[in-house]
Image (cartoon, grey):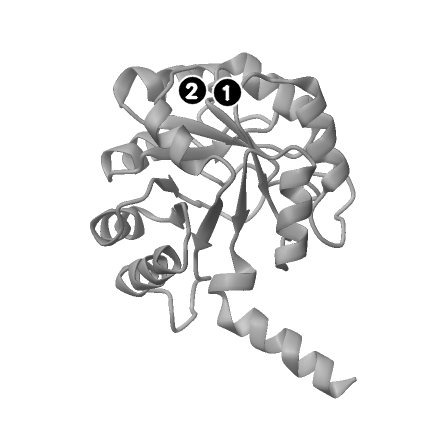
Amino acid sequence: MTTNPAILDSLAGGLIVSAQAYPGEPMRDPRTMAQVAASAVVGGAAGIRVQGIADIQFTRSAVEVPVIGLWKDGHDGVFITPTLRHALACANAGAHIVAIDGTRRTRPDGLTLAQTVAGIHAESHALVMADCGSLADALAAAEAGADLVGTTLAGYTGERPETDGPDLDLLAAVAAADLGRPLIAEGRIHTPVQARQALDAGAFAVVVGTAITHPATITGWFRDALAR
């Protein structure tokens, strides 16, 4: 585990906005995502989370808040910054924090999570956020040296059910385990009330993506409500 108090202090109790667009969408452009990120900062975002090397680079130029960078490669299994190579590319692109798959699953390059975290710390100044899916993942990620632990993959790895809204039980369990590093709530946080609940459950900071930065999904919510 390494530390950067200034970065972590700036995120404490704050909102991190995830600005990502899916492949094939009109907004799938690094410049567009950087503009979305900048708009979120105007609204009070304490940090930004973005996917892809170009998105990290453009966003770093567009905002003054910490940038969490990741690289999705694939769609199943370990695909969030799956290897050390992917992680170092994110760090070299300017990410203050590199988000990686923080589960106990086998990684494509054969490295352990601890080896991956150590490699990032040795080869860059970036902090490491472990995207976890369970308490066991979070405990293992902390042991592996991750600087931050997130609930990003709760409900997506088969260990826990996919909850309607954030997995508050998991947040509370990880908080109670007292890992000694920031706990980031992420995943299915769709309303300000849910964001507050996540913070109250023990999160250090809260990531919101779809509900702020994904117009297609938000539009669908309203469409479905009118259809009912």
Labels in figure, total: 2
Residue found 34% across the figure and 22% down from its top: 4
Q: Residue furthest left?
A: 61
Q: Does residue 107 show up?
A: yes
Compare residues 158 and 70 and report the one nearer the observer. 70
Disc on res. 105: none
Mark 1: secondary structure? helix
Left/right placement of residue 51 relative to residue 163 reads: left
**Vertical side of 119 occupied by 133: above or below:** below
Q: How far apart are marks 2 and 1 (CA)?
A: 6 Å
Q: Position of residue 183 (x, y in %)?
A: 57, 30
Residue 38 figure quarter: bottom left
Left/right placement of residue 38 relative to residue 131 reads: left
Q: Mark 1 is on which residue type? A: Leu
**Vertical side of 173 occupied by 216: above or below:** below
Mark 2: secondary structure? helix
Say which residue label 1 marks.
113
**Vertical side of 21 occupied by 55: above or below:** above
**Vertical side of 43 occupied by 218: above or below:** below
Asked if the residue under mark 1 is in contact with the one under mark 2, i.e. CB atoms within 8 Å, the reply is yes
Say which residue label 2 marks.
117
Residue found 33% across the figure and 28% down from its top: 6
Q: Mark 2 is on which residue type? A: Val
Q: Position of residue 226 (x, y in %)?
A: 71, 86
